[in-house]
Amino acid sequence: MRDSYWTKLEGDRKHVLITKRLMKRGGDVLPEVIKLNVYTSKERRIKRAPISDSQFLVDNDGVPRFAVGTDKNNDTKIYYSKGKGEDWQPFEKSVENEFTPLSFSDDNKSVYALKGDAKKPQGLYRYDLESSKETLLYRSEIADPSYAISSDLNEVYGLRIDEDYPTYIFIKLDTQEAKLHKALITAFNGDSVQITSKTEDGKLMVVHVSGDKNPGSFYLFNTETMSARFLLASNKRIDSKALGNSEPFRVKTKDGLVLNGYITLPKGKTNNLPTVVLPHGGPHHRDYWSYDPLVQMLANEGYAIVQVNFRGSTGYGKWGTAIQDDINLALQYAIQTGVTNKDKVCIFGASFGGYSALQSAIRYPNTYQCAIGYVGVYDLPMMYNEGDIKSTKWGDAYLNKTLGLSEEEQKAQSPVYNLDKLIAPVLIIHGEEDQRAHFEHALALKEGLDKKGHSYEWLVKEKEGHGFYNEDNILEANKKILSFLDKYIGQ
C-alpha cells in the first residue's frame, strides 16, 4: 500500500499531506493525516486513523479513503471512507485474501489492489467501488510483485517483478511514464530503473539506476530529447569492473514449489569454488538481484555466494519447518552445476539468517565445514521473554503465528537445544544492546557450546545493537569473518 508520509496536492503549491504519529512504546497511537503549509509550518488535521499502526491511501482529490492497520492479534484490518467528511467503516473485502489497496483510478471510482490467498501469489486487481466487481490484471505463479508503479499521485501503470532479474509488467502502455520507463530499461541494459521525481511539466526526470555491480547512480533524463545526463553515484569508490556477477537460478522443491535465488561468482572464476551459503533475515524479507556489499566482499575473497528465497520470504508464502530444506536444495543445485566444492562450504546469516545458519548446520551436520551466526536467534521460546517484539501490542500474537504455540516444537527447531547434532565450528557475532535478537540468545548458544566442548569463536561489542554501526566494529567483524572462512574453507 502506498503510504502518504507526504503527498503533493494537485494545484496547491503551499501545502502537502503528511502522516503524523506520536512516538510511543507499544505503538498504539492513532496516526493522523495532516495538511502542512510548507512555508509557515502550520498544520491542520484532515483525518485520524481508526486503528494504530496504520497506513493511509488518499484519492486524487487528496482525501484519505483507505486505512490499513494491525490490531493486537496481529491481524490486518482495512477501513474505507466514501469521501470527504465521511466516517471510517470496515471494508467489506475479506482480509484473509490479503486485499491491499494501492491507488485510485483517475475518476476515484475504482481502486487498484494486490490480492492473494494462502495458495496463490498476490495478483494485481482493479476493484470497482460501486459494483464490487474485480478484474484480474496480472498474477505470477511464483511470487508476489515487489511493488506497483504509479504515475503522479495514483494511477498504476505497471508492476515491478523480482523473480530473477528485475522486470516490469506494463499494464497501461499508453501513459507517458510507462513508455519512458520501458525505454529507460532498454537504455540501461536491464538494470533496475526507478523514476524518483519529475518536473511539473514532465520534461525532466531524475532516474535512479542500480544493479548487481552498481550501488546506485542518478541521472537527469530529458523526455523531449530522450537523453540522460549523469548526476552522481551512491558510492563513486566502487569499481564495477572488479566486482562479481550475480546470476539468478530456480529450483523446484519436492512438493512442487518453484523458488528463486542468486549465485554470485568471484571475478574470473566459475567452478569448484569454496562457497558461502547466505540465508537472509526476517524471515519475512527476501533477496533481490542487486548490489550487496557483503556479497561482493566475499566474492572478492574468492568465494561463491548462494542465496535463495525460501518459503516464508517476502512474497513466497508462509514459513515453516521446510526453510532449512529449501536452503539445502539451493546448495545442492550449486554443487550439481559444478560451482561449489562440496568439501568447502560455510553457512553465514544475520538475525533470522543467523538462526538458519546454526539450524542448517544442525539439520545437515555433514554438509557444512563452518557456520557463522551474526546477531542471530538461537532459542525460539526465549523470544517470548527477551527482546522488543514481545513489548509491542501485537508481539505475542505475532510470535504465536510465526513460531507456533507448542514449546516442544519450538525447542525442536532451536539450535541451543540441539547442539549434540552440531559438527561445524561456529563464529558468534553479537551486540550486547541488541533488543531484537536479544544478547541472551548469544549467551545461551555460548553456554551450550561450552558445555559440549564445541569449537567456536566469539566477537561481541558492548555498544552495538541488532547489527554493527560503528565503522571500526564493522571492519573488525569483517576481518574476523574472512579470517574464520579462510581457516575452514579457504583456498
Image: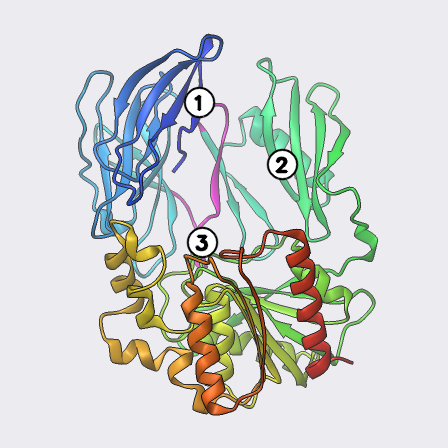
Please state the extent of the stretch shown in magenta in the rendering: 137-155
Viewer can see residue 32: yes
Q: Which mark is residue 7?
A: 1
Report x, y in % for residue 29.
Answer: 26, 35
- Circle 3 SS class: loop
Viewer can see residue 359: no
Report x, y in % for residue 377.
Answer: 43, 68
Q: Amino acid at mark 2?
A: Lys
Report x, y in % for residue 450.
Answer: 49, 86
Q: Earlier in the sequence, mark 2 or mark 1?
A: 1
Q: Nearer the viewer, mark 3 or mark 1?
A: 1
As for residue 266 lying within the magenta part, the answer is no
Q: Which mark is residue 401?
A: none
Is residue 327 or residue 387 the one in the foreground?
A: 387
Residue identifier under label 2: 182
**Residue 335, quarter of the rendered image:** bottom right
Residue identifier under label 3: 140
Name the side, left or right, on which 295 lies relative to 448.
right
Q: Earlier in the sequence, mark 3 or mark 1?
A: 1
Name the side, left or right, on which 123 lies relative to 79.
right
Name the side, left or right, on which 360 lies relative to 70.
right
Distance (Cα) linking label 3 and label 1: 30 Å
As for residue 141 lying within the magenta part, the answer is yes
